[in-house]
Amino acid sequence: MALSHSLNLHSFLLSLLVFFTLSFALPNIKANTLVSKICPDTPNPSLCNHVLNSDPGASTADLKGLGYISIKIALTNVKQTLPYIKSLVMQTTNVMLKNRYKTCAENYSNTIDSLNKSKTVLDKGDIPSLWTYASAAFHGPDTCKDSFKGPPAAPAQLNDANKKLEDLVSIVLKIGALLRGNNNL
C-alpha cells in the first residue's frame, strides 16, 4: 500500500512537472514559430533571430506584438546612431562630407518620424499604412548610403550603421507583409 501511495504521488508530481514545463514552453514555441516565419526572409536572418529572441516580450508576443518589438528595436538603433552622425557633421571641415553627413542626419531624423508613425498605425491596425511608413523608414539609411557613391567614402562605422538599420527595418517590413495576410490582429 505504501508503494502504491508513493507511485501515485510520484505520478502526480511528474504530471505537475510536465504541466508547468509545457505552460512555460508553449509561449516560447509560439514566438519561435513566428520568428522562424519572419527571419529567414529578411536580409540578415541571424540578426533578426538575435534581436527578436533577445527581447523579453517576444516569448509571448503574437505577430502584432513582434511588430511593436521590431519597431522599438529599430527606433532604439536609429536614435543611438543619430548623435554619431551629428558629431560627424560638427567634426568635419570638408564641405562635401559635411553636406553628406547633414543628408544622413536629416534622413535618420525622418526615419525616426516614420518609425513612430509605423507604431501609431499598427496601434490602429492600419497595415497598409504600416507598410508605407516602414518603407519610408528604410529609405533613411539607404539614402544616406547612396550619398557616398563617390569619394570621399563614408566611415566604416557609418556604413555598418546604415546596413544594420536597413536590416532592422526589413524585419518591420516582413512583419507588415505577414500581417497583411493575417486578419487576426
Image: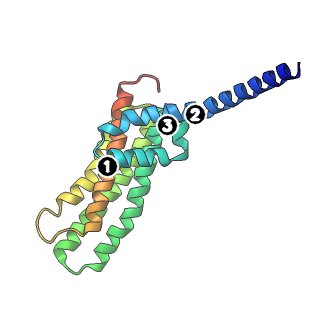
Q: Is residue 170 placed above or below 82 in the rendered structure?
A: above
Residue 165: x percent and y percent? 33, 54
Secondary-structure class at tag 1: helix
Dividing the picture into quarters, in which one does residue 35 lie?
top left
Left or right: 23 as drawn, with respect to 73: right
Left or right: 44 as drawn, with respect to 2: left
Q: Is residue 4 placed above or below 174 in the rendered structure?
A: above
Discs 2/1, front: 2
Q: Earlier in the sequence, mark 2 or mark 3?
A: 2
Cα distance in 3D space between marks 3 and 1:
19 Å
Q: Residue at x 25, y 79 (%)?
A: 92
Discs 3/1, front: 1
Q: Considering the image in quadrants, where does the N terminus appear?
A: top right
As drawn, the label of residue 25 is 2
**Residue 71 visible from this viewpoint:** no
Dividing the picture into quarters, in which one does residue 170 lie?
top left
The answer to whether mark 2 and mark 1 are in CB contact below 8 A is no
Q: Amino acid at mark 2?
A: Ala
Cα distance in 3D space between marks 2 and 3:
18 Å
Q: Amino acid at mark 1?
A: Asp
In front here: 62 or 106?
62
**Residue 179 visible from this viewpoint:** yes
Cα distance in 3D space between marks 2 and 1:
29 Å
Q: Earlier in the sequence, mark 3 or mark 1?
A: 3
Q: Residue at x 30, y 63 (%)?
A: 105
The answer to whether mark 2 and mark 3 are in CB contact below 8 A is no
Q: Which residue is mark 3?
A: 65
Q: Which residue is mark 1?
A: 167
Q: Residues within 10 Å of mark 1 (few under 14, many from 20)?
A: many
Q: Amino acid at mark 3?
A: Gly
